[in-house]
Amino acid sequence: MGFLEIADVRKDYGAHTVVHQFDLDVARGEFVSFLGPSGCGKTTTLRMVAGFERPSAGAIRIDGKDITRLRPNQRHVGMVFQSYALFPNMTVAQNVAFGLKVARRPAAEIAPRVEEMLNLIKLPQLAARYPYQLSGGQQQRVALARALAVKPQVLLLDEPLSALDAKIRVSLRQEIRSLQRALGITTIYVTHDQEEALSMSDRVVVMNEGRIDQVGTPFEIYNQPKTRFVASFVGTLSVLKGSVADAAAGMVAIGEQKIGTGRAIAGANTGDPCQLALRPESALLEGYGGGGAAGGDADAPRNRLRGVIEEVSFLGSVVRIRVRVGDNLISLDTFNSRGIAPPEIGQAATVSFAPADLLLLDGA
Amino acid sequence: MKQTRIGSWLAIVIGTLYFVVPLIGTFEFSLRMRRGEYSFDAYRVVFGDPQFQATFVYSTVLALCTIVIGVLLVVPTAYWVQLRLPKLRPLVEFITLLPLVIPAIVIVYGYVRLYNSASILPMTGSARSTDLLLTFGYVTLALPYMYRAVDTGLRAIDVRTLTEAAENLGAGWATILFKVIFPNVRSAILSGAFLTFAIVIGEFTLASLLNRPAFGPYLQLIGANRAYEPSALAVIAFMVTWACMGLINVVGAGKQFKAAP
């Protein structure tokens, strides 16, 4: 039994079900992200935890107490909104103090708590400013301080960084995670940005069309995707279309060339179409000494596919190369090396990768 | 291009003259009470008239009551329509426009039929209850202006998210309305309030037919019996209305709780 239990929750709008049988236990102090494309039901689920939407079925419990039918102002959960939702008529300090004043805390308690929160977000000098005088990043930090000031049981964040530019997003997400760790507060974070979800979370819930596709640590989600959607949504994937050459031996024909998957292909016959996927860091460009992320046993057998370099993107520390192998395009990332120039477009190339790195997707 | 500009300027000049010349004429006439020279005697007579003071104060008090009732009625209604009942918006807008098409004389005759001393609710039977009736009549007349102003103000803020944020922090409906919503539509409310004031101060039909000592009937009485004082009163009435319009602009341009970028 988790600290936060979302038990078989469903949400219908008329005849249309937007969240199907959502079941999740979140441990105390855990940071869990809901990751998925727009319209997958992640925000609707978050809003059901906050109390802004009523579940059509199921229950939500915090620390054993059923809060499903409680109004939002009775649940004692803190929420940070995508649009910050700071009160324009109040200063930063007044915004942070709002929840404490509503709870009728004594004035002697409110002032030090507000100061503590402003110090926590490193903005004590902005206490007298109004929201319109703050930058986006500052507003979001104030919104976070306001949500934390009342010491909520659970913290909910609804795509809080989506309106900010890339650099601010990176620094703020580190701040949010540090704060969450320091305070030990159970947190649900909704995002469509996989980098945010993977870098911040203890566990990630990948959602698609109102359903949970997979729950796992960032490592599990990325390296052991259970569905094609998770494999393609999280991270970059090169999809290889071929046909089964030997199902028992796990051999697949990619055009005229053959590669091994390292395991039998269940339920397939020779000649059946099949699709394999490969992460860019799993592949190596043979003869290019820049080094790749691919690790593993150097003596283990590797697959090799011959092709032609179609695109080379120099991204600074990483060189992204795309190799055409017949009808397929394989992306691979390799580290930049000062002494070695990137390969030329049109150059013949051989891509190698371990059989275990191949993900077997559903048929054609 | 030059011809268009000349045409525009010509239209402005003609329009200005059309409005300003009668006003200048009225003001000039109001200064002629003392034979042979311009003076403010008409204004002195008007301001010294106890009836002027009494009716102006009466109408001001009723205007303030109208504003308070109007705000308490319109702001929660507009807020609720925006937040929970957007489908009712066309109906509510239709209702708020009705006072523009139903003449005040129809309203007051309806009042007299419904609330006369022979009915089950004889509100016209005493002065205080008639004052109340008159106030409600003013609320009705000012409804289109107050609702428009408040609705426009509410559309400029993210009502739903602010409400959810306040609710999430533990606030009930009263706190949300008075601590979050009202302050953020303050300039819109004040705009509606000044429009209401200007309407009430000059209103004649309701006050006259309900036989109340308001400023509108006093203006008519003076107009029917004096020469120079009506002109002075007309100028004073214009000044009051323009002051209200000026205050609307000041309130709108002054300290405004801007929505955060």
Image (cartoon, grey):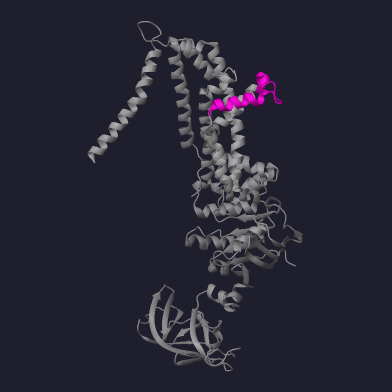
Q: Pinpoint residue A23: horizontal percent, then vertical percent.
A: 69, 68
* Residue name at image x 42 percent, y 77 percent: A319
Residue at the top extreme, as displayed: B35
Q: Nearer the viewer, residue A242 or A157?
A: A242
Q: How many numbered dots are placed on residues in this image?
A: 0
Determine if residue B154 is in view: yes
Q: Nearer the viewer, residue B183 or B104?
A: B104
* Residue name at image x 43 percent, y 19 percent: B235
Q: Is residue B46 magenta?
A: no
Does residue A306 sit above or below A91 in this rendering? below
Quadrant (top left, top right, bottom left, bottom right) of the N terminus of chain B: top left
Q: Pinpoint residue A150: horizontal percent, then vertical percent.
A: 67, 51
Indicate the quadrant where residue B119 lies: top right
* Residue name at image x 51 percent, y 48 percent: B260
Q: Is the magenta stretch mostly helix, strand or loop?
A: helix
Q: Nearer the viewer, residue A349 or A328?
A: A328
Residue A252 vs residue A341: left or right? right
Q: Give the range drawn in magenta.
A: B103-129
Does residue A93 sit above or below A303 in this rendering? above
Residue at the right extreme, as displayed: A64
Residue at the left extreme, as displayed: B2
Q: Nearer the viewer, residue B46 or A156?
A: B46
Q: Pinpoint residue B229: horizontal percent, then vertical percent.
A: 45, 12
Does residue A177 sit above or below B240 in this rendering? below
Determine if residue A90 is in view: no
Q: Is residue B105 magenta?
A: yes
Indicate the quadrant where residue B59 lies: top right
Q: Pinpoint residue B42: horizontal percent, then vertical percent.
A: 44, 11
